[in-house]
Amino acid sequence: MTTDMNPNKFNEHAIIALDDIQLGTALRRGTGNADGRRREVMGEVETKALRQQGRGAKLRALADLPDLLEKMERNVIKNGGHVLWATDAAEANQHVLDICGKHNLKRGVKSKSMATEEIGLLPVLEANGIRMIETDLGEYIVQINESHPSHIVMPVMHMTKEQVRDLFVEKLDMPLTDEAKEMTAFARKLLREEFLNADFGMSGGNFMIAETGTVAIVTNEGNGRLSTGLPPVHIAVVGIEKIVPTWEDFATLVQLLPRSATGHRMTTYVNTFSGPARPEEPDGPEEFYLILVDNGRTNIYGTEYTEALACIRCGACLNACPVYQHVGGHTYGSVYSGPIGAIITPLLQGKENAEPLPFASSLCGACKQACPVDINIPDMLLKLRRDLEDEQEPIWKIGLKSWGFGNSHPLLYEVGGKVASLATRAISQTMGEDKLNKLPYPLSGWTDYRDFPSFADQSFHAWWRHNRSS
């Protein structure tokens, strides 16, 4: 397992991951169970109609994104909250630090949030003397292990129960046990003290409902409500694409998210908050801040990749993907892994910073079939491959055009096949094997990671002319 956050090292990371027996065991258990439950509960509803209704809700929201965000801001302020806009990760982190300075906040608890992972918030807080504890059990385990989440929904998809047990024994002095219930009870006891002593809480947001200025989070643990309602200050960090126009749209999507993410018909907790506590509703924080994060999203908006912003972060495409099932999330070197991560990461970080990811797919289409809002992930992966090809150095462009020209002319194709057959078989005979394990640059890009079979003595076309032509 690797936690090196460098998407351009996908190939190197994949080799390591494929040899990790414990990782393979964890991935088989995790993805198999999650995808199986998703199929079961999605089969209970009119899947096609519900998916298209959810897709429509997200695409309508994207079509009116600027207006909906401004409406969200007005309603949050009307409800007594504060709204801050962040162009990038640095600005978002600075907003959090400024809020902490204003209210003298030193100890926080945080519900699960991919947005705060994306902006790298926790190291920034730690560097400024602010203690932040993850309270989602999976994120808590990752924090203790000083690593990164490997899945959008299930952060410790890469770990077996036995590895978690050993971690708790080593880092938290937990009495030795193999019972999952006893492990979670032990962690729950520690986290309750953190909730009671925190002076601020943080969350992300699964959805923002523009018509009332409401942020919604869905969880299967009570930590979300305790993080957002118990401390005196609540800070929500949410990507701008999480907006939906109405409660009716939310009602559709909140059916799709848990079914696709964890195979539940509904999550145990659906928490919504529209601002701080009020005289008529005294429960909740004294101060509420919503930080709306761009961090590259407006660069995607209005392009042929806009549909990627419709993602509801369920992780279903990860569980269904044969590549993810074998190498796991850390291999992608990014907060967002799997098929959707192979699109979002290059678009947010720059294609040159994540060149291998669009190619980390068999294009089998399982991701599109699993997506609850029917995002055409394979099509966008192909478009990204095209973009990367267009940005290649001239020598590669010339090589690909020459290859295309040769393959589109029958005579050149046949001659090329004969030459390749003679050359590869001569090399393989010299090496004493039926396959080529090492080819010179630039063909070494293939044999560095896979075998290259020798060409057959006779092509199919030649065989056909000899045996079937009359």
Image (spheres, grey):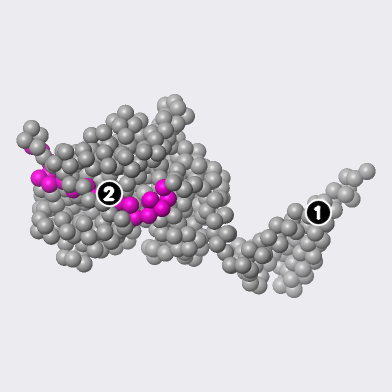
Contact? badges 2 and 1 (CB < 8 Å):
no
Q: Residue furthest left?
A: 279
Q: Residues within 10 Å of mark 1 (few under 14, many from 20)?
A: few
Q: Residue at x 15, y 56 (%)?
A: 99
Sequence-earlier tag: 2 or 1: 2
Q: Which element type, helix, strand or loop, lies under badge 2?
A: strand
Closer-to-camera residue (132/348):
348
Rendering quarter of residue 159:
bottom left
The residue identified by callout 2 is 292
**Residue 351 rendering spot, x and y as whole percentages:** 47, 59
Rendering quarter of residue 125:
bottom left
In the picture, measured across the screen, residue 328 lies left or right of residue 217, that is right
**Residue 331 rendering spot, x and y as whole percentages:** 44, 59
Q: Residue at x 82, y 51 (%)?
A: 461
Closer-to-camera residue (161/376):
376
In the picture, measured across the screen, residue 199 lies left or right of residue 445, that is left
Q: Residue at x 66, y 72 (%)?
A: 440
Q: Is residue 319 visible?
A: no
Q: Which element type, helix, strand or loop, lies under badge 1?
A: helix
Q: CA distance from mark 2 to mark 1?
A: 57 Å
Residue 157 on the magenta span: no
Q: Is residue 228 visible?
A: yes
Q: Amino acid at mark 2?
A: Leu
Q: Nearer the viewer, mark 2 or mark 1?
A: 2
Q: Residue at x 55, y 62 (%)?
A: 391
The residue identified by callout 1 is 410
In the picture, measured across the screen, residue 266 lies left or right of residue 330, that is left
Q: Residues within 10 Å of mark 2 (few under 14, many from 20)?
A: many
Relative vertical location of residue 63 with respect to residue 454 in this rendering, above or below? above
Q: Amino acid at mark 1?
A: Pro
Relative vertical location of residue 326 with respect to residue 215 in this rendering, above or below? below
Residues shaded magenta = 282-301
